[in-house]
Amino acid sequence: MKAWTGPEVPTLPGAAGRLLVHDTALESLVPVEPDAGEARLYVCGITPYDATHLGHANTYVAFDLLQRVLLDCGSRVTFTQNVTDVDDPLLERADATGVDWRELAADQVQLFRDDMTALRVIPPQHYIGAVESIPSVVELIESLKHTGAVYQVDDPEYPDWYFEVRRAPGFGRLSGLAGDDAVEVFGERGGDPDRAGKRDVLDCLVWRLERPGEPAWDSPLGRGRPGWHIECTAIALQYLGVHFDVQGGGSDLVFPHHEMCAAEGAVATRQPFAKAYVHAGMVGLHGEKMSKSKGNLVLVSRLRASGGDPMAIRLALLAHHYRSDWEWTVVDLPRAQERLDAWRAGVARTVAPAAQPLVAAVREVLRTDLDAPAALGLIDAWAAQPGDDPDAGAQVGRAVDALLGVLL
Ligand code: ZN
């Protein structure tokens, strides 16, 4: 699938170092240590039916920041992202609105591309739809079948294929969820704990056999379509290989989605799926998580259409630490615009405080679990101070562009 047009990312002098990020599985900071200088990053993409609300934008800007900091640490980055362009929520939305599901997906993916371009998010090298990944999904299910970890439920009408979670060593360690808590969250987030005929209530669907009126593809497993988790597992393994550096997404993906991907990947490859699991916080509105089902979406496209500067939108997101949950309010955008104006005035000065100490300090806070709010504070202080360096404005402008993705 076509991604979007990428921004130019300047290289700053002295680009070398190490990034520490918070790993959800270990609940501590871990270094990202790419093999042979190539960091391999997978970030779960959208299901294209409610793109692009600020919760999405917050997640993709967070991982864009991670990518920019890795680049500034001297790594190359191979970045893969999926698009869940066939799944229940998309099909339900298409049914409810009378739009063909393919058309709905195509329109929403285009909207997402336009928003990502405007927000200056670096595109993935591999932007892969679920539909186009079906051959590799089927291949992965077949290989899991050979290990005995995939089975058909005992249902004469629809003997769908499931992954047996207990086959995975350490299942549950990523999320720390077990027992009734795990079952409850599984049920809330697309799982089917009540499906009869499973070996374990948490076993997850990997191949859904064709139902009347639903899209389906031929395969040795029978005509059907992939489950959600196996789609990401297959795409990540195909485009990044085993034991890649970071699997990322919003914190609502920790369980079951990333736990299932990690389990399937570990059983299929006999190696840990990813080295670190990194999660962005949730953006709320009026006390609730932003989501289509709650009808409380703030869309990036709507903010842009009403004159919001995409760089101010990006700064409004970066003003919150990527791991924190926070609420969008009416003051977020005007405040970010004020900051953007102050920074633009700061870099446009004929003389300003030297860039080098500022860039070193910004690098330091970003390399310690991507502390963007601290970086923003440092730049605010620089922009407010007098100085006598005629080159500093241009140098700081380049650094803000390279590290934070904000074009001044
Ligand atoms: Zn995913």
Image (spheres, grey):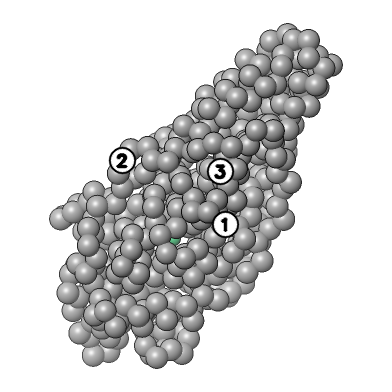
User: Which residue position holds label 3?
Assistant: 70
User: Which residue position holds label 2?
Assistant: 27
Q: Is residue 25 above or below residue 357?
A: below
User: Which residue position holds label 1?
Assistant: 78
Residue 270 in view of the camera: yes
Residue 103 or 239: which is nearer the viewer? 239
Label 3 CB-ligand 1 distance < 8 A: no
Amino acid marked by disc 2: Glu
Q: Is residue 240 above or below residue 211?
A: above
Q: Residue at x 63, y 19 (%)?
A: 357
Q: Secondary structure at mark 1?
A: strand
Residue 105, percent across and down?
Answer: 58, 68
- Quote the CA–CA distance across marks 3 and 1: 11 Å
Mark whose residue sits in front, 2 or 1: 1
Residue 211, percent across and down?
Answer: 39, 84
Amino acid marked by disc 3: Leu
Q: Secondary structure at mark 3?
A: helix
Label 2 crowd bin: few (<14), some (14–19), many (20+), radius 10 Å? few
